[in-house]
Image: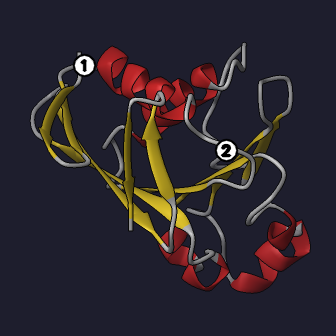
């Protein structure tokens, strides 16, 4: 179970808890939502992405798009556009992919390694920072920006 540490800050004790927190967050997301995942390699970004996909009713595997840059899942409650910009060489590469069609788009856009091309991020987004606090524990901070409204399965709201 994810334990709330402070406003918009959570502590999970396992990959399952991380996925469950993300799934709970997904229940409150609407079309056009952009989430940016921040954290070092091994911080839990992929587990968070899997949980978010499950919360959007997406079935099947959710691999990291490290080599493809973009994975599209359109069978859920909302489409999920999962970007991983780790291997992006320059902004031109993203432009060729049509990244502006997804930021924001008609579904939920999730971006890993966004620091590679910050200029493409919209002002209205949710920054999700994952910090390892042990072998399986993760601190997860949710920071709404630009008027993004944070809803955790409809029970809590916070707006910046």
Horizontally, residue 31 falls left or right of residue 145, namely: right
Q: Secondary structure at mark 1?
A: loop
Horizontally, residue 81 falls left or right of residue 42, namely: right
Q: From the image, which quarter does the C terminus lie in?
A: bottom left
Q: Of residues 83 and 57, which is closer to you in this image?
A: 57
- What is the x, y in percent for residue 78? 78, 34
Would you say residue 29 is visible in this rendering? yes
- What is the x, y in percent for residue 138? 21, 36
Q: Residue at x 81, y 58 (%)?
A: 105
* Mark 2 neighbour density, 10 Å: few (under 14) some (14–19) many (20 or more): some
Disc on res. 49: none
Q: Of residues 5 and 149, which is closer to you in this image?
A: 149
Would you say residue 113 is visible in this rendering? no
- What is the x, y in percent for residue 93? 79, 76
Residue 131's place in the image compared with 52, above or below, is below
Q: From the image, which quarter does the N terminus lie in?
A: top left
- What is the x, y in percent for residue 103? 74, 66
Residue position for label 2: 65
Q: Residue at x 62, y 28 (%)?
A: 53
Q: Residue at x 33, y 41 (%)?
A: 42
Horizontally, residue 117 falls left or right of residue 76, namely: left
**Label 2 or label 1, whichever comes before in sequence order:** 1
- Disc 2 from disc 1: Cα separation: 23 Å
* Mark 1 neighbour density, 10 Å: few (under 14) some (14–19) many (20 or more): some
Q: Secondary structure at mark 2?
A: loop
Residue 127's place in the image compared with 121, above or below, is above
Q: Image quarter for residue 57?
A: top right
Residue position for label 1: 14
Residue 126's place in the image compared with 56, above or below, is below
């Amino acid at each position: 179970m994810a334990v709330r540490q402070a406003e918009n800050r959570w502590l999970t004790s396992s990959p399952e808890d991380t996925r469950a927190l993300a799934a709970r967050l997904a229940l409150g997301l609407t079309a056009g939502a952009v989430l940016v995942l921040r954290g070092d390699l091994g911080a839990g970004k992929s587990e968070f992405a899997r949980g978010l996909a499950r919360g959007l009713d997406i079935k099947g595997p959710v691999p990291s798009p490290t080599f493809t840059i973009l994975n599209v899942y359109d069978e859920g409650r909302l489409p999920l556009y999962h970007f991983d910009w780790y291997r992006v060489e320059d902004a031109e590469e993203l432009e060729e992919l049509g990244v502006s069609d997804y930021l924001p788009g008609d579904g939920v856009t999730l971006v890993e390694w966004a620091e590679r091309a910050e200029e493409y991020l919209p002002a209205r987004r949710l920054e999700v920072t994952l910090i390892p606090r042990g072998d399986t524990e993760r601190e997860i901070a949710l920071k709404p920006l630009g008027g993004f409204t944070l809803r955790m399965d409809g029970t809590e709201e916070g707006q910046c």
